[in-house]
Image (cartoon, rainbow, N blue to C red):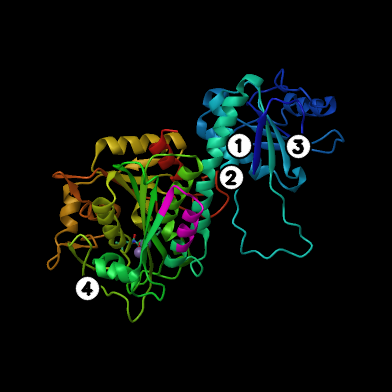
Amino acid sequence: MQLNVNANENINGTLVLPLWQGSETMAEGSEAGVHRNLKNQVDNVLSNGDFKAKTGSSMTLAGLDEGKALLIGLGKPEDATEQSMREAGAKVIAARGKIHGTTLTIRFHGLEDSHMASFVEGMSLRDYSYDRYKSKDEDEEEESELVIHVTCEPDKVSDLAAATRLSSAVATGVHLARDLGNAPPNDLYPQAFAKQAVEFAVNHDNLEVTVISYDQAIDMGMGGLVGVGMGSERKPCMVIFELNGDKPGPSPCIVGKGITFDTGGISIKPSASMDEMKYDMHGSATTFGVIAALAESGWDERVVAVTCMAENMPSANAQRPGDVIKTYSGKTVEVLNTDAEGRLVLSDGLWYAGTHLDPSYIIDLATLTGSIVVALGHEATGLWSNDDELLANIKAAGEHCGEIAWPMPLFKAFEKEITDSKIADTRNLGAGRWGGSNTAAAFLKQFVPERDGEQIPWAHLDIAGTAWGAKTNKLVKHGATGIHVRTLHHLITGQ
Ligand code: BES
Ligand code: MN
Ligand code: ZN
């Protein structure tokens, strides 16, 4: 999408009018450059109540020689939020259809700066579809890129242009995360992800990407990553990102679960919807997306990240339920269920992050448990932390971005449950299935290193319900959401 912001009166392509509920005519002062017949048509549908401008509504006006219009309902002014404005912007893309072509002019008038910015952000985020595996008919021309002219009052142009540059930069990170999440698991396997990260770094001078290979992981004693990945032909690896490594640490550190496909391993999953387990690497997709968003928005302070990549397959070489593995931390785990694999790869990623990367805090993201989907549905990510301030900051950043992260407890009882193996230091399965996302979080906590006698500030985001499949997420058409790229970009940069 090409976006330019100006105060011109010209209307290129379809005129897009965001309208408050209850508008009886076009806002006074907003009609500059609009042909009288088109204005009459708009005023007619507004005054006779054919278009009420309710939240989520839209109407196409066409048939005149003098141009087309797309009316977008903003709902009542007193109910407007940044999120409702993002969703209204997304509606422009969702409702556009073939009839409006690829050139649009948005006419803002009398809107708050932040509302206009959120509307534009919503357009950018929603302008995404994953069609690289669809064959094009020979006569079907590739649809050209959307060109969107955003017009507003002259004194608001420069602020809106700046906000647009920022949200477009961050949206490239969101879209990269969606691309990775949507990619089919036969093409996106651990080494393929690593290769893409290395190639990305080649094009960004201030980013260094290092890959810990399978053989190195074995030598280093990363029993969690190795145990999960060894059953696959496509061997596991760990990918380390360091942005602006010339700046002194301690710095924010993001850790992502990257199971490129989760069959469950020997504790195999039922086949219904198993295809969705291609999204089980969305933690790593978000991690890469955050790095890309920071690089694109010009962030110049150090940020580090780790993604734990593996394919969880059943095979003659796969780990078994009953195996005891030794993780990178030195702690042993009794593997009672090979489908609880995310926590195993993360145990090594968290320990590596804490001991090698000089983090100020560590935030991990993982499609970790089905039970968080039972608890929160698709509406929120589960959030656990050993640090109240970090938890509050993540929660606030999520709210700011319309990506809700909801606090969950780290009770001692959960830690006890997950550390009372008869034969090892920890077990990868709770005693029963109740509170399964909490015992998973409690397990991860065992692998956050201490510094000066205190555990490094750490938070865990269980994105199993928010990484894909949220029908109520209006900023996504289908598939991977790119969840929390924006939250973390905002948390890290304050922008
Ligand atoms: N990747 C799954 C979690 C998951 C399931 C995410 C469904 C999204 C939708 C994870 O590896 C897993 O299998 N978790 C198990 C843990 C259990 C064996 C303790 C689960 O949630 O059932
Ligand atoms: Mn699993
Ligand atoms: Zn999994």
Quick one: label 2 or label 3, which is nearer the N terminus? Answer: 3
- Disc 2 from disc 3: Cα separation: 18 Å
Q: Amino acid at mark 4?
A: Gly
- Dot 1 alpha-carbon crowd within 10 angstroms: few under 14, some 14 to 19, many 20 or more: many
Q: CA distance from mark 2 to mark 4?
A: 46 Å
Quadrant, the N terminus: top right
Q: Secondary structure at mark 3?
A: strand
Left or right: residue 159 versus residue 391 is right
Decide: marks 3, 4 in contact (CB < 8 A)? no
Residue at 37% across, 43% down: 302
* Mark 2: amino acid: Arg
- 58 within the magenta span: no
Report how many numbered discs are placed on residues in the image.
Answer: 4
Identify residue for label 3.
14
Figure quadrant of residue 422: bottom left
Closer to the chain start, of discs 1 and 3, is: 3
Q: Quadrant of the C terminus?
A: top left
Return the x and y of residue 118 as percentages of the image width and height.
55, 33
Q: Secondary structure at mark 2?
A: helix
Q: Earlier in the sequence, mark 3 or mark 4?
A: 3
Three-letter amino acid code of the residue under disc 3: Thr
Residue 125 in view, yes or no:
yes
Residue located beneath label 2 in the image: 126
- Nearest to the observer: residue 97 or residue 137: 137
| Ligand 1 visible in quadrant | bottom left
Q: Are marks 1 and 2 in contact (CB under 8 Å)?
A: yes
Pointer 4 residue: 322
The disc label shown at residue 89, or none? 1
Residue stretch rendered in magenta on the structure: 195-208
Q: In the drawing, does residue 43 fall left or right of residue 367? A: right
